[in-house]
Amino acid sequence: MLNIIYYPVNIATKEVSSVGLIAEHRGGVLHIPENVLKTKPLPEKEGFSCIALNDFSGCEYIADFRGKTIYQTESPQKTKKVTELGEIENGYTLEEPLNYSIWDGEHWVQKIELIKTAKKQAVTAWRDQQESATDTKVTVDGVTWDANPESRTRLTGALSATNLPDYWTDADNNDQPITRETLQKVNDEITALGFVIHARQRQMKKEIENLTQFDDVENYVIGWAN
């Protein structure tokens, strides 16, 4: 007796198995389950699955991106995994975004304006870090003094007071005899350092703004020497 082969169909997704099963003969009757494909399905195709037609008379290809990551074209940081058969939903793409890019309708295009903004924000963060560093020091008349935010607060308080303390502890933890003139010099030196930091960050932002190539902005090094 000729063997009859059928191909199981996943009822949930309508995917047709590429592996055929032989129908059983029991009691002189050929037993073929319902909702199966009785003809050989289409050959496997990269990026597609084969699903049964509604009447199970054959099958057709459908896009299969399940398990792949898709990116929202308006907000590329928003992603999700494809879980269903079919084309990518509107507003998403399989194409992985480039850094500092926007979607032009077909591809991601890098924009120098975006990376300039990000780079300038990084410069601001560098400035804030320099101004709040706990290890900042200045030297006045051969003596090194702490110039961190906490020390600056104490110094400002001392200068505004009527009477000065008898000594001021330097950065090496040595007690130094102090005068209002010396404290003012330390304060002036700290103020000057703050302006140097401010001037450097303005210089860097100007240099970044004047760059015309994306890679040059991306490779711009933030810091004291550039």
Image (cartoon, rainbow, N blue to C red):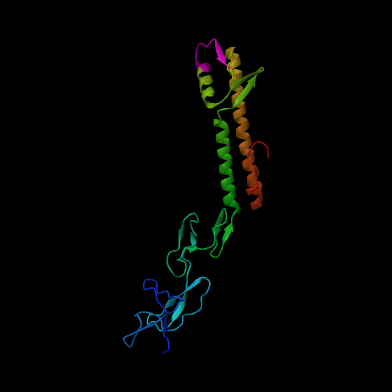
**42 left or right of 208 in image:** left
Query: What residue is shown at x 59% (from left), y 29% (from top)?
Result: 194
Image quarter of the N terminus: bottom left
Find residue 184 and report its image quarter: top right
Query: What residue is shown at x 51% (from left), y 70% (from top)?
Result: 47
Query: What residue is shown at x 53% (from left), y 17% (from top)?
Result: 159
Q: Position of residue 111 (x, y in %)?
A: 59, 55
Q: Is residue 154 magenta?
A: no
**211 left or right of 41 in image:** right
Q: Position of residue 124 (x, y in %)?
A: 56, 39
Q: Which residues are magenta?
A: 158-169
Q: Residue furthest right?
A: 226
Whether 85 is drawn above or below 198: the answer is below
Whether 216 is drawn above or below 222: the answer is below
Query: What residue is shown at x 63% (from left), y 46% (from top)?
Result: 209
Q: Position of residue 43 (x, y in %)?
A: 51, 78
Image quarter of the C terminus: top right
Q: Residue furthest left?
A: 27
Q: How many marks?
A: 0
Residue 76 or residue 152, whichever sits in front: 76
